[in-house]
Every structure is written in structure tokens, then in C-alpha cells.
Amino acid sequence: MILLDGKKTSEDIKTEITAQVSAMKSRGEKVPHLAAVIVGNDGASLTYVSSKVKACERVGFESTMVRLPSTTSETELLKKIHDLNADDDIDGFIVQLPLPDQIDTQKVLMAIDPSKDVDGFHPENFGKMALDMTTFIPATPFGILELLERYNVETKGKHTVVIGRSHIVGRPMSILMGRKGFPGNSTVTLTHSYTKNIAQITTQADIIITALGVPNYLKAEMVKDGAVVIDVGITRVADENSEKGYIITGDVDFENVSKKVSHITPVPGGVGPMTIAMLLKNTLLAREQRRK
């Protein structure tokens, strides 16, 4: 069994980006600038955005965190997005989700300039991705592709089963794994909460990508020998024996499933670290596109 080490791979990517940024500086070019907008005081969101800022510092990017109170109106947030769209110093930015109830998330995502949408959530970028055009791929699916590529996991002609159909992971992964190229060229089955007899489908899969957020959902008997398993799930599960009072658990019963598979991602340390690394890669792409 080969562990798909997202922590190590993400560090490799950051080292590569650092070298590219150093080369940009030596040529007298402007370095990439990523901004992050966060509305409210959600602890998990604040931690995640802070880690993105630290990652920017690590690779030599400029970064800006825009913090707005939870009482921010939709109009006020849209005004801030308009300002970021118009700011030539900002190459890309993200709006951290979830947003407070008074704000229409879809309206906010639609307001972001597609050329600065480094999260890859704007319909224009999603459409380009579906048409195999150069664009920003959502960071988590982008990270999964990078892991498959760097570990040289064969995908051509394989049967890929995706569990979960979110716009952030499941749906884009179903498109990307079926595209022409590598990773891709696989036959994809997209499953969800209304799919009957999922275990019958997953036991036929060469590659399983699960993004449900249900701890230990994928059991060993649902996986065939030698399969590749990508666990995108990340859930806090109460644990009295942990200092924090909880442990981070994925969708996969790792202890038992890992004994059957050829490749598997751990949780934590698998897909999670790749998400931030690929956000940096998208920001670098945005800077290069703006320079051209």
C-alpha cells in the first residue's frame, strides 16, 4: 500500500512556487498578491484563512486578509468585491464560505471577476473546466489531480466512482476524471444520497473519491483489492482521550480499508494540505495571465 502523502507533496509544490517567485523578483516583476475576504468570526474559517496567509508568506506572495463583521449586509460585501475586482494590485481573491444567512452566496460568487476567481467557483471558470479549456480548477479537485499525477496513478480506462455531488468537489471531480488527458480518461460513476446500492458500485471501482463528510462511511467490504482511495472527507469527532476533545476523521475506515488498497490518502495529511497549495498555484497562474 502506497500512502498518497499530501503534506509532503504540498511542501514540494510550495518549494517550486517559491523558486518561481524568486525568479520573478530577480526579473523585477511584481509578485502574486492573494486576498481573502472573511465575514464573521467562525473559528474554522478564521483558522483556514490564516493558514492561507501563512502559506503566502512561505512562498513570497503578498497577501491581504479582509475581515468584515457578521452583520455585514449583502450590499456591503458586494461593494468590497467590486473594489477588489478593480484593484490592479490584487491578482486573485477568495471569499471564505459559509457566509451569514443574510447574504446570497451565489450572488457573491457571481460578482467575482472570473480572471481573479482563484477558487474556481465562478460559472465561467466551471464551464471552461468542463470544456477542457485553460482556467482555474477548484483547489481541492486540482489537488487530487496533482496527487494522482505525482504518484503516477494510472487513470486511463479505469472505473472511477465519485461519492458526493457538491459543486466544490464531487461534480468537478466527475468531469475532470473523465476528461481527455492525464489524470483522466476514466469511466466515471457519480453517486449521491439517492443512489441505491452504493456498495455494489464501489466494489467495482478502480478509483474511489469520497467527499461526503460522513466519518468512516467507506468500509473495507465496499472496496475491491488493489483499488485507489481518495478521502476528501474531514469531520471533527468527539474524543475524550484527545487533548482538543476531538479527532479529525475522514470518510474512510482507514485502518481496515488501507489493508486492501494499492494507494490511499490519510486524514489528516492527505487532500487537505493540497487544497492550499493549489490555491497558491492558481494565484500564480492569475499573476502570469494578468502580466501577459
Image (cartoon, helix red, strand yellow):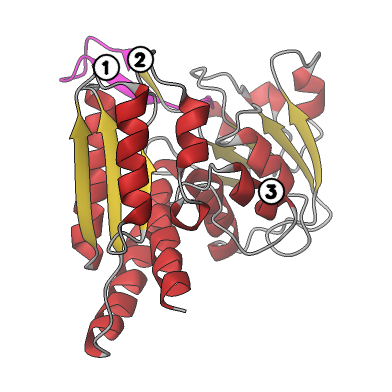
Quadrant of the rendered image containing residue 98: top left
Is residue 193 visible in the rendered image? The answer is: yes
- Label whose residue precedes the other's in the sequence (1 or 2): 2
Relative to 46, say whether 27 is above or below.
below
The residue indicated by pointer 3 is 127
Mark nearer the viewer, 2 or 3: 3
Q: Is residue 199 left or right of residue 231?
A: right
Furthest residue toward left = 243
Q: Is residue 43 left or right of residue 204?
A: left
Quadrant of the rendered image containing residue 133: bottom right
Which amino acid type is shown beneath numbered disc 3?
Answer: Gly
Q: Is residue 96 left or right of residue 111?
A: left
The residue indicated by pointer 1 is 246
Which amino acid type is shown beneath numbered disc 2?
Answer: Val
The residue indicated by pointer 2 is 237
Which amino acid type is shown beneath numbered disc 1?
Answer: Tyr
Q: Nearer the viewer, residue 129 or 261?
A: 129
The structure residue drawn at horizontal position 41% and vertical position 77%, both measured from the top left corner, is 291
Relative to 197, say whether 205 is above or below.
below
Residue 55 position in % (x across, y down): 25, 55
